[in-house]
Amino acid sequence: MLYSDKVMDHFTNPRNVGILEDPDGVGEVGNPTCGDMMKITIDVADDKISDIKFQTLGCGAAIATSSMVTEMAKGMDIHDAVQISKKQVADELDGLPAPKMHCSVLATDGLKVAIDDYLVKQGREPIAGEIKSSDPTFDPHEDEDIELDDE
Ligand code: FES
């Protein structure tokens, strides 16, 4: 299985690792396929993600995608950050091997849960919609053919 230089860089030198103290939003998700887990914490100012950190107990691709999603989301409006897709994260990493595409769901779902957690704590409506990784019937491989066709 071949990983891009960017994946290897984010795996061996992950950015924004850790947990924020007294964060505005917390997202914890698990991948039903492999049992890997991710926790993401965010601080928000004027609806922009002012700080973000993650902890991932998972494979190399899960760590690299978690690291990348924190870089992408930092400074972004929450309404834009909630739209980040696993395909966008994989593209930013110059691609992921097809069997590892499902790993990037952890990172994008963790961010979505953290954003909704922030909004609900503020008494506002959640915006993330369905969180795929928390659905036990979710098949993380269901759209991998589409991802492959796009490469
Ligand atoms: Fe579990 Fe990658 S194998 S997230």
Image (cartoon, rainbow, N blue to C red):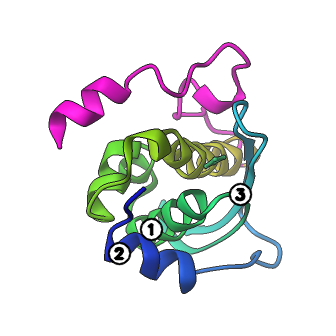
Instruction: Check disc 3 and give the amino acid type.
Output: Gly
Does mark 3's beta carbon lie closer than 8 Å to ligand 1?
yes
Answer left or right for 113 relative to 79: right
For mark 3, does the 10 Å Cα neighbourhood hold few (<14), some (14 to 19), or many (20 or more) residues? some
Would residue 48 be seen by someone viewing this image from the given angle?
A: yes
Residue numbers of the magenta segment: 122-151
The image's mark for residue 68 is 1
Residue 108 is situated, as x and y percent measured from the top left of the image, at 51, 47
Residue 8 is situated, as x and y percent measured from the top left of the image, at 45, 76
> Dot 2 corresponds to which residue?
6
Give the answer, above or below, for where 84 lies relative to 77: above
Q: Most extreme residue toward the bottom, as rendered?
A: 13
Name the residue at 71% across, 28% down. Answer: 134
Tell me how far mark 3 sits from mark 2, CA to CA: 18 Å
Pick the residue in front: 80 or 132. Answer: 132
Q: Earlier in the sequence, mark 1 or mark 3?
A: 3
Answer left or right for 31 relative to 72: right
